[in-house]
Amino acid sequence: MKKIGKSILLIAVLTAIILNTDCSGQKAKPAEKSNPVSKETKYKVTFIELGSVRCIPCQQMQPVMKSIREKYPTQVNVLFHDVWTEAGAPFAKQYGIEAIPTQVFLDKDGKEFYRHVGYFPEEELVKVLNQKGVK
């Protein structure tokens, strides 16, 4: 019986070692947050999209948000809240949303400086970002 117990312990230890290393044999690092920009980064603008993944005009805003994220990763913080979900509903109330999609733009101090309701073409949206020095 002692032999079986030692064998199980040995298997458990070896499994733990294998699972804690990557293909190079190096010890695995803990997962990092997906945001590549450090917390110290002060965005010039926070662009908040309030909508729903089930809303057609909101779906049309998805490529616009993606493009803004890619073009201005250190200058614009792009956030999306699905206000038709339990998690997103409080943001609809917080920002006084009456129709979706609604875009809310906050300056570096968190103060709202612009709001738009409906689909917002990227070219027009960039003009709003330029007001706060986003280039």
Image (tube, rainbow, N blue to C red):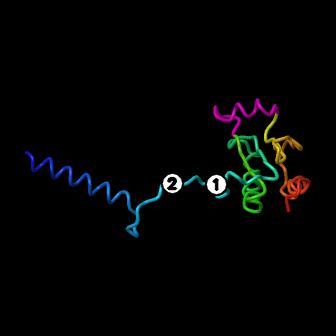
> SS of the residue at dot 1?
loop
Quadrant in the picture for residue 109: top right
- Tell me the kind of residue under disc 1: Asn
> Which residue is label 1 attached to?
35
Question: In the rendered view, does 94 fall on the left or right side of 36?
Answer: right
Q: Would residue 49 appear left or right of 134 to someone viewing this image?
A: left
Residue at the bottom extreme of this rendering:
24
Q: Which residues are magenta?
A: 82-98
Q: Is 130 in the magenta?
A: no
Specify the farthest residue to the left.
1
* Res 82 → quadrant: top right
Q: Amino acid at mark 2?
A: Ala
Q: Residue at x 84, y 47 (%)?
A: 107
Q: Residues within 10 Å of mark 1 (few under 14, many from 20)?
A: few
Quadrant of image for the C terminus: bottom right
Q: Residue at 40% across / 68% down in the picture?
A: 23
3D distance between C-alphas at marks 2 and 1: 12 Å
Task: Name the spot of residue 38 as percent of width and height, x first.
Answer: 67, 55
- Considering only vertical position in the picture, is 22 above or below 59? below
Residue 2, horizontal then vertical, whole percent: 9, 47
Q: Is residue 109 above or below residue 42?
A: above
Say if mark 2 contacts mark 1, CB within 8 Å.
Answer: no
On residue 31, which mark appears? 2
Identify the residue at image location x=74%, y=45%: 56
